[in-house]
Image: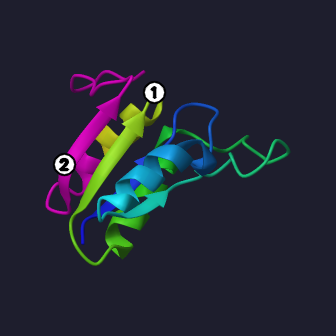
Amino acid sequence: MTHAILVPGFWLDGASWAEVAGALEAHGYEVEAMTLPGKESRDADRSAVRLAVHVAAVVARIDAAPEPVVLVGHSGGGSIVSGAADARPDRVSHAIYGDTGPHPDGQGT
């Protein structure tokens, strides 16, 4: 079974992937829709959250997966997917960008 990690855009949480997750599960994927650090609630402390924190959270999920994963990023999640794929190139089988794209080396959002 292919494991897909769904990374939401800027202010969204894992629930924003509900329809997509359901469709992927219906096609045999094991799906993990992430809620990134600082997006747990409106009151979450985001003062120390940076791009590197979000990338590290995704990398941790990649490392916990039993097999190589498919990463899917939406909007601001594209930069996070790029960073995580760069950190674990041997553990990411595909990186998919929705309403976003990978950035050239050295360029952030």
Please give the name of the residue rendered at 31% of the width and 33% of the height, measured from the top-left corner: 97
Q: Is residue 53 magenta?
A: no
Picture coordinates of residue 33, whole percent (x, y): 50, 55
Amino acid carrying mark 2 in the image:
His
Q: Amino acid at mark 1?
A: Ser
Q: What segment is highlighted magenta in the picture? A: 84-109
Question: Can you give x and y, in whole percent of width and height, for residue 76 in the image?
Answer: 47, 29
Q: Position of residue 65 (x, y in %)?
A: 33, 73
**Residue 9 shows up from this direction:** yes
Give the structural element (helix, strand or loop) at label 1. loop
Farthest-out residue, front: 26
Q: Residue at x 37, y 33 (%)?
A: 78
Distance from disc 2 to disc 1, alpha carbons, whole Å, reads: 17 Å
Q: The residue tagged with tag 2: helix, strand or loop?
A: strand
Give residue 53's mark. none
Q: How dense is the environment of label 1, judged by Cα within 10 Å: few (below 14), some, or many (20 and up)?
A: some
Q: Residue at x 40, y 40 (%)?
A: 80
**Residue 2 position by quadrant:** bottom left
Which residue carries the number 1 mark? Answer: 75
Give above or below for 9 relative to 33.
above
Quadrant for the C terminus in the image? top left
Front-lying residue, 51 or 65: 65
**In the rendered view, does 16 fall on the left or right side of 23?**
right
How many numbered discs, if any?
A: 2
Give above or below for 32 relative to 1.
above
Report the side of 41 relative to 108 (left or right).
right
Q: What residue would you read off at disc 2?
A: 94
